[in-house]
Image (spheres, grey):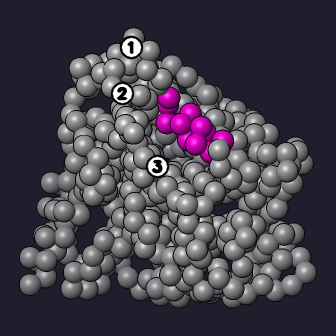
Amino acid sequence: MKKKVAYFVGIKGVGMAPLAIYMKQAGFSVTGTDVSDRFITDEVLEQAKIPILTNFLPSHITRRTDVVIATGAHGGKTNPEVRKALKLGIPVFMHGQMLGNIMSGKEGVAVSGCHGKTTTASALAFLLSTSGFDPSYSIGTSTIIGLGPAGHHGSGNIFIAEADEYMTCPVTDPTPRFLWQKPKMLIITNIEYDHPDAFPTFNDVKNAFLRLTENVDAKGTVIACIDNRHVRELLPFIKRNVVTYGFSKDADFRIYSFSLLEGVSFMKVANKTVEIAEFMLNIAGKHNMLNLLAASVAANFSGCSWEKIKANIKNFQGSKRRFEKIEEVADVLFYDDYAHHPSEIRATLAACRNWYPKRYIIVLFQPHTFSRTKILFKEFATSFSDCDEVIVTDIYPSAREAFDPTISSKLLVAEIKKIKKQAMHLPGKVDAVAYLKKHYVPKSIVMTMGAGDIYKWHDDLIPMYKAVSL
């Protein structure tokens, strides 16, 4: 029997690549196209033996193609390959739509929230996989440490997916992506104002999340972080069974005691009636305690015992680009993190400071999008209190917005300097490597941070530090 052919337009995206791997494992013949630049997902796509074409050419689409999956990053339905598919009558689905289609035939678990989706979804996939459930999942990163690619077609009936609030396609469809999903279980990690280009007001964001809860199966469950003020405000309006978690005393599942040590954390968890267990975690930060608690509650509701959760959670080490330790050179530690919102930056740096209270922390921050930098300007300026030095690079532009001359990294640095003297603007990688070579700090941490391509800078930073430390 001939395999059905699935073609991905923009296959290297952190959402698209896991979905492509999932579909290949599900029995499709998968190929796709993207730009030629090396990206974080190239390696897992190559390992999956998925061919990647370059340039978006209509000739890539033929009548042998059964389905096309597209992303808004490359024009969505205005992309020349997508237009060719539509002309030929080939079904075209945006990424969010395809996730929803897959979830409709499974016991879907949607993981939503402005921050923490990837870590929470990855932890849930890890807990269920290591407990013998073999779930399917498509999670917005390249790799889950200890599991492999972030896309997997399992033998079980559970399907875990990130539920992203951003637009289905900025060019043609403003529908929040997560509204295509109709899960049996929904996790809400937090609600904040993160996409000013997609939501004119914060109320629009809150309303989108409320609409998402209405997509949950009538007999399903919403697992919500009650510590987040905006989630708490939403609770009275949710018409589904709600289970809360957090540090708050009124949470259904509560972290009532915790300790943050260098390289390891502990949290004690109870429900409304009994103490459940003390969990050892190999992932840093109070914010990640919340993420792992959400994953643990979801795993338990999916049939996993607390004994198995306790045994396996200590082996979870996160996912790619989430407080990821890259390398250690002499006495310098290199980390990378995807944080690109003020709340994420604060949480990541607080976690880093807790784990390494005596080290000198240097952050290389690459702001992501002009609109976010402009709207959250004051919040960004106050986000770096837990590092010793911050170097801000030029803003990483998005294909979905135009250049804005009224905002710049230089302006952001000037604002940061009102609070922290050790702040500077260095345009790019060459400047940063040269500066750090001249200003070697023993026993320091060098952390790249941002949603752009700054993670690639370690390829130049690490060899330089190795040479300097000889």
Q: Give the residue displayed 74% in from the left and 51% down from the top.
A: 184
The earlier-in-sequence mark between 3 and 1 is 3
Task: Identify the amino acid type marked 3.
Answer: Ala
Residue at numbered disc 2: 65
Task: Spot the residue most to the front.
Answer: 1
Q: Position of residue 302 (x, y in %)?
A: 71, 65
Marks 2 and 1: CB-CB under 8 Å? yes
The residues bearing labels 2 and 1 have C-alpha atoms spaced at a distance of: 10 Å
* Observer-nearest of 152 and 250: 152
> Which of the two discs, 2 and 3, labels the residue nearer the N terminus?
3
Question: Which residue lies under the disc numbered 3?
Answer: 26
Find the distance from the CA under tag 2 to the CA under tag 3: 16 Å
Q: Quadrant of the C terminus?
A: bottom left
Mark 2, residues whose alpha carbon is within 10 Å: few (<14), some, or many (≥20)?
Answer: some
Q: Amino acid at mark 1?
A: Leu
Q: Which residue is mark 1?
A: 88
Q: Which residues are magenta?
A: 93-104
Residue 99 horizontal side relative to residue 32, left or right: right
Q: Give yes or no for residue 103 being in the magenta stretch.
A: yes
Q: Main secondary structure of the magenta part?
A: helix
Callout 3 environment at 10 Å: few (<14), some (14 to 19), or many (20+)? some
Which numbered disc flags the more N-terminal residue, 2 or 1? 2
Q: Residue at x 78, y 54 (%)?
A: 222
Query: Which label sits on residue 353?
Result: none
Question: Tag 3's secondary structure?
Answer: loop
Of the pair 139 and 449, the residue shown nearer to us: 139
Q: Amino acid at mark 2?
A: Thr
Q: Contact, CB < 8 Å: mark 2 with mark 3?
A: no
Does 237 lie within the magenta span?
no
- Is 203 rendered above or below residue 132? above
Which residue shows up at 26% across the image and 51% down it?
49
